[in-house]
Amino acid sequence: MRFSAFYRTALLLVGLAISGISLSHAADWPRQVTDSRGTHTLEHKPLRIVSTSVTLTGSLLAIDAPIIASGATTPNNRIGDAQGFLRQWSDVAKARKLSRLYIGEPSAEAVAAQMPDLILVSATGGDSALALYDQLSTIAPTLIINYDDKSWQSLLTQLGEITGQEQQAAARIAEFDKQLLAVKQRITLPPQPVSALVYTAAAHSANLWTPESAQGKLMEQLGFTLAPLPAGLHTSQSQGKRHDIIQLGGENLAAGLNGEALFLFAGDSKDAEAIYANPLLAHLPAVQNKRVYALGTETFRLDYYSATLLLQRLSALF
């Protein structure tokens, strides 16, 4: 695909592919951005940001970044609203008049039509538009962001530096940390260690959150200990070599769910009941002791909004 000279010259001409990002902390622009390919320059604070990753969008909204459009998931499913935006920030997206780029399959044409001056792409996951990087980078500076190897707070800080919204990011994190400390002091933890996962009853499978995941990091911040997998258990990590999940299925499912309690992210009471009703999981300590906890469907992806809802849920449970 070739874009007109208008897109190549009216917008910034710097194409960036960044996986490990470090920025100068100078308050003014331009800003130097260093990655494995060298040092690049963002000439001005972005004014029209497009997120091809619905996961990154929530964090951009949380720091009041000027995001104008976002990729979306399937509308009206367990985690998405009528637009395909994640339910935890659906109301914020409506208030900001956020446009939907596309559903699922990325489209460079849809991105170009928004005339962005910064494009963000996730490095991994089902919402990654990495395959279109070469096309996207002819439209505007295109940054590739990893969200599977860090806490949502670290991601928020990184996005704050990229967009010039450092103060807003710091304020959101400070606000959340205050809530987290209050919840940590108030709750009584169940027996440890625990397993944190997304359970798919129909497929008899689960994605286990690792200590590298945002979900795992938040559980540990609250004082929970994640159960290590049994030695020699065969697992797989797919979806672009993600660091945040370990896939469990078949005979490995029961062996991998070895925590004293099971915490179901992206799950509701029906998911908890499905685990209790599965005869192949009946021998698990968490099942026998009725320690399977559904944390809400909006916790599939953690950002400021869903993490706040998660604190409220855990506070109510414990």
Image (tube, helix red, strand yellow):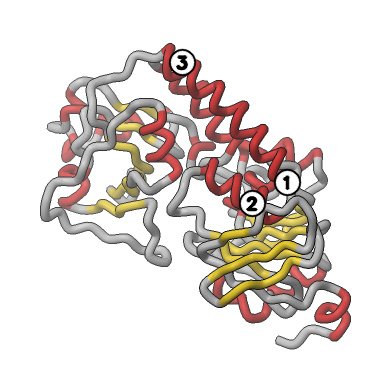
Give the class, few, some or many, for how many residues have Cα within 10 Å of label 3's Cα (few <14, many ≥20).
few
Q: Quarter of the image holding residue 43?
A: bottom right
Whole-percent x, y for residue 58 in the image: 64, 45
Q: Residue at x 38, y 43 (%)?
A: 198
- Tag count: 3
Residue placed under numbered mark 1 in the picture? 165
Whole-percent x, y for residue 16 in the image: 64, 72
Whole-percent x, y for residue 6 in the image: 88, 80
Q: Residue at x 65, y 58 (%)?
A: 24
Residue placed under numbered mark 3 in the picture? 316
Please name the amino acid that badge 1 sits on: Gln
Give the class, few, some or many, for how many residues have Cα within 10 Å of label 1's Cα (few <14, many ≥20).
many
**Mark identifier at residue 159:** 2
Give the class, few, some or many, for how many residues have Cα within 10 Å of label 2's Cα (few <14, many ≥20).
many
| Secondary element at image label 1 | loop
Q: Quarter of the image holding residue 167?
A: top right
Instruction: Say if mark 2 contacts mark 1, CB within 8 Å.
Output: yes
* First in sequence: mark 3 vs mark 1: 1
Image quadrant occupied by the C terminus: top left
Q: CA distance from mark 2 to mark 3?
A: 31 Å
Asked if residue 254 can be seen in this view, the reply is yes
| Secondary element at image label 3 | helix
Please name the amino acid that badge 3 sits on: Ala
Q: CA distance from mark 2 to mark 1?
A: 8 Å
Asked if residue 78 can be seen in this view, the reply is no
Q: Is residue 147 depicted above or below 184 in this figure?
A: below
Please name the amino acid that badge 2 sits on: Leu
Nearer the observer: mark 3 or 1; the answer is 1
Q: Is residue 66 depicted above or below 107 in this figure?
A: above
